[in-house]
Image: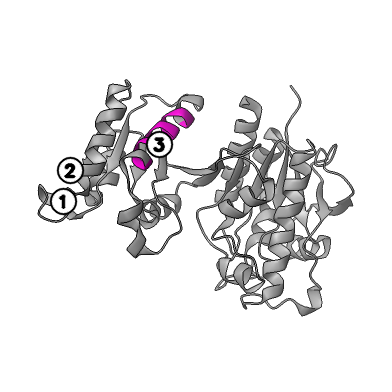
Amino acid sequence: MSLPTIAVTMGDPAGIGPEIVARALGEREVRACCNPVVAGDPRIMARAVELVKSPLRVRTVQAARGAGADPSTLDVLTAGEVDPATLTPGKLDARWGVAEAQCVQQAVAVAQAGEVQGIVSAPLNKETFHMAGYTATDDMTYFQECFGAGDAYQVGEVAGLWTTPVTFHVPFRQIPDLITQEAVLHKIRTLHRVMSAAQVSPLKIGVAALNVHAGEGGMFGREEIEVIRPAIQAAQAEGLDVTGPVPADSFFPMALRGDFRGMVFMYHDQANIGRKILGRDQPGVSLFLGMPVPVATVPHGTAYDIAWKGVANHGMIVRAITMTAALATSG
């Protein structure tokens, strides 16, 4: 079977995106699973290749179809051009927001044309993105906006655990109002579907509580009683193996001892604190699914504090590429 072609965006040019992409595309496991092509500025990518001392030769291509097959080259579809002489690593600038958005647009365009079967996004800086005038709240929302189709949702994987949040990038004060029985049940169902496609076994899902001590019988909030537990019971009635609500401070320890492999969280940081700790030793990935092709990114940001110093770890973007290729191949 032929390898899928995967578009990899350059990300924020002032962040660690270019250098981790340059390192990742030199890895054998990446080349063994797909033909990668970068959507980005060839000059910036050439500078990143030089920084990390990669043997890859940067080559500009006009189309994604047929690109990425030569393991000695880093093929680039031109997008998000930035004059390297004006690039200031680690500094906020609206130009970087324009560049990263244009890279996403290029990746989506070649996906819509059928030239690539999946997309991996290097970190996008939301502040520069919004400085540039884009109004999407986050990268997943912007991908869905660019595709103009699908009902996107996030699933993460790290250390063999599969995670999804009921709410995503929203103000903390809004979270309780967004947690409804329908929303929790929907996330249980979608996580079950993704884990089934990935052939995860045993396929058991835990659902986190919202309030401290899972509400302590209503003493600290009634969301567990009135919203979360009824959603779990509805999923169980459909034949899904689901447990909860589990107090958030016990959730990861229970998952790591094997009580469940899938984890439904109530909000973003409830999931990502544990994911990032685990991901330091075991690379994780964030998947944006429900769109025409699978999209993946890394569960870390642009890391301005270490950008363009040649020290950024590329393990997570390697994992994102290999998982995207697997999803693209599985259909």
Residue 101 is a magenta residue: no
Which portion, as a residue range, is magenta?
A: 183-194
Q: Residues within 10 Å of mark 1 (few under 14, many from 20)?
A: some
Disc 3: which residue: 186
Q: CA distance from mark 2 to mark 3?
A: 18 Å
SS class, disc 2: helix
Q: Amino acid at mark 2?
A: Ile
Q: Residue at x 21, y 54 (%)?
A: 211
Disc 1: which residue: 215
Above or below for 74 versus 243: below
Q: Amino acid at mark 1?
A: Gly
| Residue 101 percent across, percent down from the top left | 69, 60
Q: Residue at x 56, y 37 (%)?
A: 290
Label whose residue precedes the other's in the sequence (1 or 3): 3
Q: Amino acid at mark 3?
A: His
Label whose residue precedes the other's in the sequence (2 or 3): 3
| Residue 170 percent across, percent down from the top left | 43, 60
Above or below for 252 versus 20: above
Left or right side of 304 for 263: left
Q: Which quarter shows the C terminus?
A: top right
| Residue 269 percent across, percent down from the top left | 37, 57
Q: Nearer the viewer, residue 101 or 259?
A: 101
